[in-house]
Image (cartoon, grey):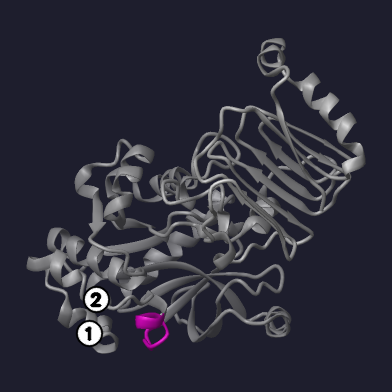
């Protein structure tokens, strides 16, 4: 039976403050109690079976994986000595699986933090993928039919149809994340697909291709000295190292509902929303608000008044992020470190603040909206609290007003 390997790396900086070093993106809970990683595992279990699923991650993340997937055998968790991008991680996993199962084993790789909501289409796609990988010396990738001119995804241009394998094609080229004009042209032409970052191959096909196109990794990595040699490997993605260079790459297109959850806008787009297109979670109150996402992980209310296109996140660690009109927070911005108690005001359309120490003892109510409406908002916030809570904070609540 084919093996599935989940790639669980990265910090998910674009989802600050919800994600951080101790809570990477794949741990986000979405529509219930199952994290993105757990949903990926559940999805793969229906295709590969639980005993054929593995995870590769960095050493600091191993404890997170064990917490998220307590039934995963310890021998199925491959730990990288350092964070080295996808090519070294995939090479490490393939080397370990080669030693156990031989070079005819089929192995598939999947990111841990993607959201796929059409399970039948996913299973049907993988059946075509594994059939192709089993019968040909080929590297198979999955392409998602684009539904809008996305600039945050890489693209794959479809080549000629492969004989004897219905619904599969060669690959003409891989394309880096395009600008809006090029993305619109790709959408119109109809022969470009989003690069889903999912790969399948027989191990012999993979190692032959690596020897030809990425000999540096092959030469430097020594399974007998895995830790020391891994640290010498270049930090390079599997796309750059192999997929863009190899001539034996095949594309299996699919129309499954897929999202790589790259930023807050994508999370909002995939979230269940009310009639005003608002997704809200936690203790909150909103009035005259539309097309917005509100997440509050604290025990005091987050209030949003009279705004559209807002993304507001308040965590129990004491961090707050508010974006207005544009939910895309740059990686550099979300990585910013803040001094204790710092109020950084607006930077473009992004308001960020962190107390640097986690939540304080003083209850704090955050109101986002017109300052003139604060009095009514506070009355509403007070009414949302339990009698015990109102009694506990009487005379000592702190109010912060953000007026975009």
In the rendered image, residue 28, in percent from the top left (x then y), is placed at: 52, 45
- The region drawn magenta spans 240-248
Q: Nearer the viewer, residue 216 or 361?
A: 361
Q: Tag 2 or tag 1, which sits nearer the N-term?
A: 1
Q: Are marks 1 and 2 in contact (CB under 8 Å)?
A: yes
Q: Secondary structure at mark 2?
A: loop
Q: Is residue 394 visible?
A: yes
Residue receiving disc 2: 233
Of circles 1 and 2, the one toward us is 2
In the rendered image, residue 47, in percent from the top left (x then y), is placed at: 40, 50
Which residue shows up at 22% across the image and 85% down it? 216
Q: Nearer the viewer, residue 319 or 204?
A: 319
In the rendered image, residue 349, in percent from the top left (x then y), is placed at: 75, 62
In the rendered image, residue 268, in percent from the top left (x then y), is placed at: 69, 51
Residue 311 versus residue 392 in the image, above or below = below
Residue 151 drawn in magenta = no
Residue receiving disc 1: 216
Q: CA distance from mark 1 to mark 2?
A: 8 Å
Q: Residue furthest left?
A: 224
Q: Quadrant of residue 253?
A: bottom right
Q: Nearer the viewer, residue 27 or 141?
A: 27
Q: Is residue 260 visible?
A: no
Q: Nearer the viewer, residue 270 or 19?
A: 19
Which residue shows up at 73% across the image and 84% down it? 181
Classed neighbour count for the residue bearing mark 1: other residues with Cα under 10 Å, few (<14), some (14–19), many (≥20): some
* Left or right of 94 on screen, residue 5: right
* Left or right of 127 on screen, residue 323: right
């Amino acid at each position: 039976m084919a093996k599935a390997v989940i790639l669980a790396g990265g910090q998910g900086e674009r989802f600050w403050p919800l994600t951080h070093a101790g809570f990477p993106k794949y741990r986000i809970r979405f529509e219930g109690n199952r994290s993105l990683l757990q949903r990926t595992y559940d999805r793969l279990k229906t295709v590969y079976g639980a005993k054929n699923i593995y995870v590769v991650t960095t050493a600091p993340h191993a404890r997170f994986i064990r917490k998220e997937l307590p039934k995963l055998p310890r021998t199925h968790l491959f730990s990288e000595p350092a964070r080295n991008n996808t090519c070294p991680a995939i090479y490490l996993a393939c080397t370990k699986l080669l030693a156990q199962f031989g070079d005819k084993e089929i192995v598939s790789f999947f990111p841990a933090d993607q959201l796929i909501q059409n399970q039948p289409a996913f299973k049907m796609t993988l059946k075509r993928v594994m059939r192709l990988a089993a019968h040909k010396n080929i590297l198979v990738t999955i392409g998602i039919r684009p539904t809008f001119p996305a600039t945050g995804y890489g693209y794959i241009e479809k080549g000629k149809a492969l004989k004897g394998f219905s619904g599969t094609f060669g690959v003409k080229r891989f394309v880096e994340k395009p600008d809006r004009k090029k993305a619109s042209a790709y959408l119109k032409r109809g022969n470009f697909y989003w690069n889903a970052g999912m790969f399948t191959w027989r191990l012999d096909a993979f190692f032959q291709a690596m020897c030809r196109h990425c000999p540096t990794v092959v030469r430097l990595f020594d399974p007998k000295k895995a830790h020391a040699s891994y640290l010498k490997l270049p930090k390079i993605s599997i796309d750059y190292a192999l997929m863009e260079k190899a001539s034996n790459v095949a594309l299996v297109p699919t129309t499954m509902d897929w999202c790589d959850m790259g930023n807050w806008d994508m999370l909002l787009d995939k979230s269940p929303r009310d009639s005003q297109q608002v997704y809200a979670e936690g203790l909150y109150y909103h009035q005259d608000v539309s097309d917005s996402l509100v997440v509050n992980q604290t025990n005091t209310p987050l209030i949003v008044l009279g705004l559209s296109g807002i993304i507001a996140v308040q965590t129990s660690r004491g961090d707050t992020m508010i974006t207005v009109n544009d939910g895309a927070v740059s990686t550099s911005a979300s990585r910013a470190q803040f001094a204790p108690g710092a109020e950084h005001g607006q930077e473009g359309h992004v308001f960020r603040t962190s107390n640097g120490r986690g939540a304080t003892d003083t209850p704090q109510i955050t109101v986002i909206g017109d300052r003139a409406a604060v009095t009514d908002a506070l009355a509403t916030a007070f009414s949302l609290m339990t009698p015990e809570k109102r009694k506990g904070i009487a005379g000592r609540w702190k109010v912060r007003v953000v007026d975009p």
